[in-house]
Structures are given as C-alpha cells and as structure tokens.
Amino acid sequence: MDKAKIKCSVSDCYYNKKMMCEAGDIEVKPMGDNTVNTSDGTKCSTFIKETSV
C-alpha cells in the first residue's frame, strides 16, 4: 500500500517538508473530551516543534 500524502501548513513542524508531512506515523486526537463534530476539534499529536529536535 502506498503511503498517504498529507498536506501540512504548520511551518515550524519538524515533519513539514515543502508543505507535506514526512512523519512515518501520524496520530490525530480529539481536543478536550472525545466528542468531535468538525476538524476544528482535532489536533495532530505527531507535531514536534522544529527547533526541539
């Protein structure tokens, strides 16, 4: 199976290479409780600030 191509507009994420996510695995979690109705209620838990690595 081909790797999914995921766009990323977070310029200071370590995994963002030319607006594409290059992380090997990506985890998306709900913000707050587990009830989510739109993408606004989610967050990328894979994010690492570029200067942290």
Image: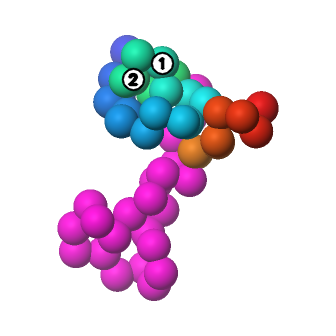
The residue identified by callout 1 is 17
Q: Which mark is residue 44?
A: none
Q: Is residue 40 magenta?
A: yes
The x and y percentages for residue 3 are: 41, 20
Would you call the spot at circle 1 few (<14 residues within 10 Å), some (14-19), or many (20 or more)?
A: some
Q: Are marks 1 and 2 in contact (CB under 8 Å)?
A: yes
| Residue displayed at 22% across by 74% down | 37
Q: Report the side of 51 relative to 35 (left or right).
A: right
Magenta segment range?
24-45
Residue 1 visible to an observer of this rendering: no
Q: Alpha carbon of mark 1 to alpha carbon of mark 2: how far?
A: 5 Å
The residue identified by callout 2 is 20
Q: Is residue 27 above or below residue 41?
A: above
- Pick out the residue farthest to the left: 38
Would you call the spot at circle 2 few (<14 residues within 10 Å), some (14-19), or many (20 or more)?
A: some
Q: Report the side of 7 relative to 46 (left or right).
A: left
